[in-house]
Amino acid sequence: MNIKFNKIEKSRVGDIDFDNIPFGKIFTDHMFVADYADGKWSNYEICPVHKLEIHPGNLAWHYGQAIFEGMKASVTKDRVPMLFRPEMHAKRINASARRMCMPEFPEKDFVEAIHTLVHLEQNWIPPHKGSALYIRPFMIAMDEAIGVRASDTYKFIVFTMPVGPYYSQPVKLFAQDTYVRAVVGGVGEAKTAGNYAASLYPATMARKEGYDQVMWLDGIHKKYIQEVGTMNIFFVINNEVITPNLDGAILAGITRDSVLHILRDRGYNVSERQITIDEVMEAGKNGSLTEVFGTGTAAVIAQVDRIKYKENEIFLSDDQWNISTMLKNFVNELRDGSLEDLYGWTVPAENVWNI
């Protein structure tokens, strides 16, 4: 494989205050870029992060062919850079690509690009607990034409960013029954930009009322819980851990899948099933709801302390957050190497392409 490497003259990493990192605003030195044309991917390059020159008629601007992934790299106490289940992200971005009528990116090349880029940028990984190097692979259409159709050309890019915790406090959720995120048969299970654009207005409304995120209900009955804006969602009711089943309208979270494995291996009663907002609110009122938490790459495990639905509101006490606290510690310790990984999920980032 022919990989072009254009290295910066001097890294900016020495200018970064790792004690004060805003989420999503600081970029590392390099990115990976590839182009798709004539039915194949080519022009693989790791180069300095730079702005793109894109035509105003670019199909992605007008018809929304844009998909992405979210990943994280952490470091062990010996400063070994570690990836978490990169092959699952390779599979998921290709599932998104298929749904959005975009070309799949070779899984082997995806994983090797992530390995090589993270190995190169490992000095950017913050040393603090809960912090990480956020990895953003994405793909956009590149044809310069107006007309509703799939593009023939695409660009695939991976860039990285040092980040602190996504949520530093428990999360407050607003159950939305006016607007919907996705319906079965739509693109809810794809990690496509349009899903997030559609969520912005309801999320802004929720924040104005003092809530952090929207908890989405299904688009038909508007009673079955789907997910939260930034994560999948779990409920602990009468010692049963419940998460909405994947029905085609819910993103198949990789942290969600990991949590399900951990819980089942530890003997918890776990259900993937439909759950209504009425069931959750009633359980919150009668005391049988003890924990609510979200799972996601950015959030990892985010504990919830308030849920509002219509005129009703329930509160959750942190003295009962046993399962979510165990999971949060478990996943973070897997990522930083302080816990033996019996699942084989964590792998050291290596310079696969010898750049």
Image (cartoon, rainbow, N blue to C red):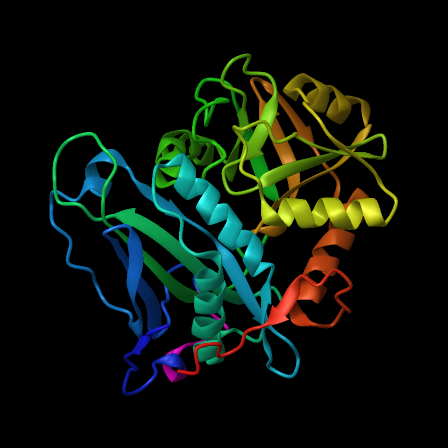
Does the magenta-highlighted stretch encompass residue 354?
no
- Left or right of 355? Residue 254 is right
Most distant residue in the right direction: 267
Q: Is residue 319 visible?
A: no
Q: Residue at x 40, y 84 (%)?
A: 14
Q: Residue at x 63, y 49 (%)?
A: 255
Q: Is residue 235 visible?
A: yes
In which quarter of the view is residue 135 placed?
A: bottom left
Total marks in image = 0
Most distant residue in the top direction: 221
Between 214 and 346, which is closer to the camera in this rendering? 346
Does the magenta-highlighted stretch encompass residue 19?
yes
Question: In the rendered view, would you say 139 is above or below 346?
Answer: above
Q: Could you tell me which quadrant the N terminus lies in? A: bottom left
Residue 106 position within the rendered picture, expressed as x and y whole percent measured from the top left: 43, 56
Q: Residue at x 63, y 37 (%)?
A: 233
Q: Could you tell me which quadrant the C terminus lies in? A: bottom left
In which quarter of the view is residue 10 placed?
A: bottom left
- Left or right of 218? Residue 240 is right
Between 181 and 279, which is closer to the camera in this rendering? 181
Residue 117 position within the rendered picture, expressed as x and y whole percent measured from the top left: 43, 72
Question: In the rendered view, would you say 81 is above or below 280?
Answer: below
The kind of secondary structure the magenta stretch mainly shows is loop
Residue 330 position within the rendered picture, expressed as x and y whole percent measured from the top left: 74, 59
- Left or right of 230? Residue 68 is left
Question: In the rendered view, would you say 50 is above or below 69?
Answer: below
Residue 142 position within the rendered picture, expressed as x and y whole percent measured from the top left: 21, 48
- Left or right of 223? Residue 105 is left
Between 316 and 90, which is closer to the camera in this rendering? 90
Between 351 and 11, which is closer to the camera in this rendering? 351
Q: Residue at x 67, y 23 (%)?
A: 274
Task: Please state the extent of the stretch shown in magenta in the rendering.
Answer: 14-21
